[in-house]
Amino acid sequence: MTVTPAIQRAGIGNCIVDLVNFINIQEREKDHSSSRPSSPRPQKVSPDGSSSSAGNSSRNSSQSSSDSSCKTSGEMVFVYENAKEGARNVRTSERVTLIVDNTRFVVDPSIFTAQPNTMLGRMFGSGREHNFTRPNEKGEYEVAEGIGSTVFRAILDYYKTGIIRCPDGISIPELREACDYLCISFEYSTIKCRDLSALMHELSNDGARRQFEFYLEEMILPLMVASAQSGERECHIVVLTDDDVVDWDEEYPPQMGEEYSQIIYSTKLYRFFKYIENRDVAKSVLKERGLKKIRLGIEGYPTYKEKVKKRPGGRPEVIYNYVQRPFIRMSWEKEEGKSRHVDFQCVKSKSITNLAAAAADIPQDQLVVMHPTPQVDELDILPIHPPSGNNDLDPDAQNPML
């Protein structure tokens, strides 16, 4: 709008000129704001439920900045739109409101179509009509339970840029848990963070799980099957390197039970089990596969005989060379929790000799004499005392065991 010379000659004054200049400034600011690319804009929600954009005028610019940075002053609302579409093409009815950690995110659902295999991509993608998640009475979706709003903001950036930048103060395991919940692949090309050690640790856990599942199928499982076919219900496996040589003397073998161990010659598997973290991953995989009594560690294993010490009148002492190698021990026995023998036998006394106990009306179960019964493997070592002539058994005498 311009001021013509006729208006100036009419003597209307400077008021009209100031008004025209103000209108021109407002139009330029409106055109400038509409041409900006869309970005997340925090908005303050008023107590009556209506939201006002931060920075609507120069008078409340400082107030809006304080409201957007402090969550305790009011509920935060973040608007996420598709940068390609622009704010003009997105109608309010096409946006969805996601509630995460008591924070509302107003999102253009079209941003989720770029990642259709994620949870949000399936919820608001092409199959939205089949979505099992229903909005609340206000039409808002409560999603990502247990995930913080700061983490969710970083994840929303993934749908726009394809990259998740780990926020300050958020640990990599926390970010990993959120990605797993939302079905987002946790890869080095997706995650950017400053703590490279924590990131490499998570990636190593993923690689160790895949690698051990391969070793389990190709190397360990065949030995377990061989043990099972021989009637065993457990397996002890020792991992040796490709260069290790086992040469036992047939006349003087090791006396530590190593003959019942299975052996795997694999330098790669040996290097894999050197790390404690890898052994923890392997143990978790074996537990998931239903195995029990799992033990993984490093132990000494005899390889060859070094020398024999002969003792006069005794058994020769054989000295073997031992190497420290990883081992795996596991069981698939189902009845390992049940006792196979009677530990004690309860026998009621035929007579009550304690009159005070009888007068107190104490149940006779408390007067039972407990005598341990020897186990099966103890019967062979029980001492046998020949009866003497002075201690002949009286058939009418009371059995002391009773």
Image: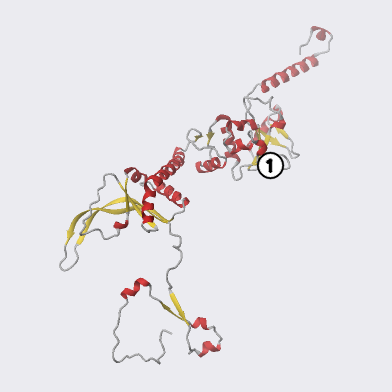
Front residue of 225/358: it is 225
- Asked if residue 398 lies left or right of residue 355, the reply is left
- In the picture shown, does residue 369 fall above or below 323? below
Query: The C terminus appears in which quarter of the rendering?
Result: bottom left
Q: Residue furthest front?
A: 229
Q: Position of residue 152 (x, y in %)?
A: 59, 38
Q: Along the horizontal axis of the image, is 200 left or right of 42?
A: left
Residue 358 in view, yes or no: yes
Say how the picture is coloured: secondary structure
**Residue 339 to residue 350: above or below:** above
From where the camera sits, is residue 73 visible?
no
Could you tell me which residue is drawn at 61 percent across and 42 percent down? 144
Residue pointed to by mark 1? 134
Residue in the image at 42% along x and 71% along y: 341
Q: Please tell me which residue lies in front, 361 or 60.
A: 361
Please identify the quarter of the rendering in which residue 125 is found: top right
- Name the image quarter holding the N terminus: top right
Residue 272, horizontal then vertical, whole percent? 37, 44
Amino acid at pointer 1: Arg
Q: Quadrant of residue 235?
A: bottom left
Q: Residue furthest left?
A: 312
Residue 282 in the figure: left or right of residue 108 = left
40 vs 145, nearest the viewer: 145
